[in-house]
Amino acid sequence: MKSEGLPIIISAPSGTGKTTTCKVLKKRMSNLKIATSHTTRKIREGEWDGVDYHFISKEEFESKKNKKEFLEWAQVHTEFYGTSLEAIAKHQQAGFDILLELDVQGVASLRNMDFKGIFILILPPSIEEMGNRLRKRGTETEESIERRLNTGKQEIKSYQKYDYVITNNEVEETVESILAIVRAEKSRVARYVPTSDDIKELLG
Amino acid sequence: MKSEGLPIIISAPSGTGKTTTCKVLKKRMSNLKIATSHTTRKIREGEWDGVDYHFISKEEFESKKNKKEFLEWAQVHTEFYGTSLEAIAKHQQAGFDILLELDVQGVASLRNMDFKGIFILILPPSIEEMGNRLRKRGTETEESIERRLNTGKQEIKSYQKYDYVITNNEVEETVESILAIVRAEKSRVARYVPTSDDIKELLG
């Protein structure tokens, strides 16, 4: 009577604190797995096939891509990276929750395939604050920051694609809200599993 | 930009631990109010009108009942007790969450009037355990216990009327789940309120 794990999809405009939030979240959730991605790049010393990545050839990657086995994929320089639906399903069936950090495009494609998961959007307290946080990093040109801000605004506008919206005022509070959402979702009536044989029998 | 409070409706078959759960919950939620009921019985020493109850005449009660001002009402011996919709709305508009302990009939009538709230059903780990808990009280005849068990089974069968189902294995855990549900519900996309003027303007 063990229940399935939940895919948790998290998006946030740049400068909202998603990376930090997800880092703290991973520490707090003992039941959380990150889906192992596939890559065409060479294995490095200290890496394990099937643990760090599934290392595959470009031909295999192309074939999986064509068979629509990837939830999402990306090309970085000459190498390919992808998250397979199978990797997610495997963890889920074993009862683990799976964290997926996706952008709005990724979320839109998951919604189109009617993917079952919890969609959470993390937002900055204000657009001004989002700009401040991006500038504080000091790693980008003003032009690049403006581009990120414009993309961020589009992401805020698409908030209705999500199930939950959290304003990130303080990382610990945001993580508490995500933990609450996951806990609450597990108590949703659609996920109720009888906890004894006599209740199971009663509900037929 | 303060958000409205949430009505939290909690039901449970007898012998599930609802009374204890709600007692702990009230201590844990600083933002929680209990709707003040109306009653036709006489005010007692130490009680305050409008605090402990709204003390009204039988004529006034009858009139409110006929005007459908009560969410639910009951007769105990020769006196009447009722929870007015107005009392709930008042707390809600002031930003307080409101706890309503209702039975399945009460829940059904709220659902029929499309009442907006979070409906939570607390269930025992098993029907056997529910019987054990009722017997442990030692205050009732076996016949009365059997009657309660049968009512309880009907309540378990109607679990799909609720939004959330929590199995009460341990009171603290059950309270944590309710707190998580309330927190999560406040982050639902439908309840998102822009937290700054620039986001408000962006979302038009």
Image: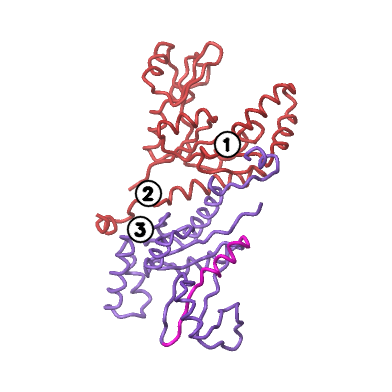
Chain colours: A red, B purple
Query: Residue placed at 64% from the left, 42% from the top?
Result: A168
Q: Chain of mark 2?
A: A
The secondary structure type at the circle numbered 2 is: helix
Against A54, residue A202 (above or below) is below
Task: From the image, tell me which residue sits under label 3.
Answer: B159
Query: Residue placed at 65% from the left, 54% from the top?
Result: B2
In reply to whether residue A88 is colored magenta, the answer given is no
Which portion, as a residue range, is magenta?
B78-95
Question: Horizontal and vertical percent for residue A170?
Answer: 66, 44
At label 1, counting other C-alpha atoms closer than 10 Å, the crowd grade (few under 14, some 14-19, many 20 or more) is: some
Q: CA distance from mark 2 to mark 3?
A: 10 Å
Against A53, residue A108 (above or below) is below
Against B14, residue A188 (above or below) is above
Question: Horizontal and vertical percent for residue A73?
Answer: 48, 21
Residue A190, labelled with which disc?
Answer: 2
Tag 1 and tag 2 share a subunit: yes
